[in-house]
Amino acid sequence: MANSVGATERKRVLSGIQPTHDSFHLGNYLGALKQWVELQESHDAFYCVVDLHALTVEPDPAALRKRTLASIAQLIAIGIDPAKSTLFIQSHVPAHNQLAWVMECLTGFGEAGRMTQFKDKSQKNGADRTVVGLFTYPILQAADILLYQADQVPVGEDQRQHIELTRDLGQRFNSKYGQTFTIPEGYILKAGAKINDLQEPTAKMSKSSASQSGVIELMDTPEANRKKFKSAMTDTEREVKFDEKNKAGISNLLTIYTAITGSTISAAETEFEGKGYGDFKSAVAEVVVDFLTPIRNKALELLEDPAHLTKILSEGAEKANAVASKTLAETYEALGLIPRS
Ligand code: TRP
């Protein structure tokens, strides 16, 4: 039983999410955040809202403030329990920036330039509109991970290269300056369901998609989400059958339905045999709305009590700082930096 494992024997996981939007969406939840909640039962979990990473997209200060708190509230609302996990805001732990500098001094210019996310984003915007922070983004991410001596990093497939860089930097440091960092494994979330956009069912559900009408938000009203399901893109046939190639919309709705209800695709196909797409869409909408409503209410309730949130955040920061400052002190010592007495 996972619970009988003592805290010291538990593997440590760390993950982070950017506070770049007012709400997480169903794809974030089913693809990754749901596993964060599960992992806290069997692992020593550290989860951070990476507000410093969000500075690379130049957010409005009021929006950043609001989104950071909304992110924390939503993480608690989906089940991240501050008594089980260390939940904190990245900028509350100065060691992230301090270790990032050390890691920048170990990273090759070409090596950083080969990061595909950086290449994609900088190509899209042009060199003059690309900030240096976007270039060093993966190095700050490596610091986030290495500081906590994380064994595993639960992330989506798109983060694989950043985890490889983290491992390379950790190993490079260890072999130059002596064993200091745990080399983390990527824990690429395959178990999670891959949810697509309701309007464009061949593309991943994403906040950067052209229209928000295919994105189911955790913080949307039930009415708004029902409307999105109602207008979800389907096909001209009438059979509720899983066929990603020819019936991307229906298949995506089936994936959502089974991910929420825990049922299987074939059971769901049988359940909706002979029923029209309209009935099927309403049924999917209802299970999603029933699932999301308490989450939304809980998050709104938390946001109405800033003193309570502040307390959770300061306890999280305290626990995170204790681990991070120890690793940073060992790192400085290994590098030959003189400790301040
Ligand atoms: N780059 C990650 C993403 O976009 C977010 C992130 C920042 C992260 N620091 C991290 C993820 C540390 C895991 C561990 O999803």
Image (cartoon, rainbow, N blue to C red):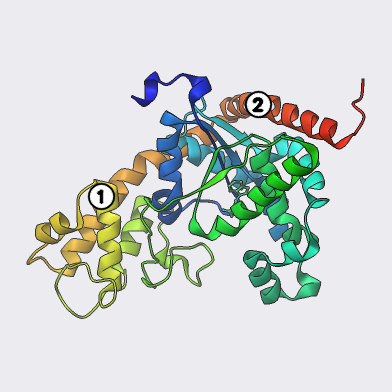
Residue at 36 percent of width and 57 percent of height: 225
Residue 329 picture quarter: top right
- The answer to whether 156 is drawn above or below residue 243 in the figure is above
Q: Position of residue 83 (x, y in %)?
A: 50, 23
Residue at 73 percent of width and 66 percent of height: 113
The answer to whether one can see residue 219 in this image is: no
- The answer to whether 89 is drawn above or below residue 228 in the figure is above
Disc 2 target residue: 314
Q: Position of residue 85 (x, y in %)?
A: 52, 29
In front of the other: 255 or 139: 139
Comes first in the chain, label 2 or label 1: 1
Disc 1 target residue: 287
The three-letter amino acid code for the residue at tag 2 is Ser
The three-letter amino acid code for the residue at tag 1 is Val
- The answer to whether 76 is drawn above or below residue 161 in the figure is above
How far separated are the C-alphas under marks 2 and 1? 36 Å
Q: Position of residue 314 (x, y in %)?
A: 65, 26
Do the CB atoms of the residues marked 2 and 1 lie less than 8 Å apart?
no
Which residue extends farthest bottom? 236
Q: Please rate how many residues cluster around mark 1, counting C-alpha atoms within 10 Å: few if below 14, some from 14 to 19, many from 20.
A: some
User: Tag on residue 129?
Assistant: none
Numbered circles on residues, count: 2
148 sits left or right of 112 in the view: left
The quadrant of the picture occupied by the C terminus is top right
Residue 228 picture quarter: bottom left
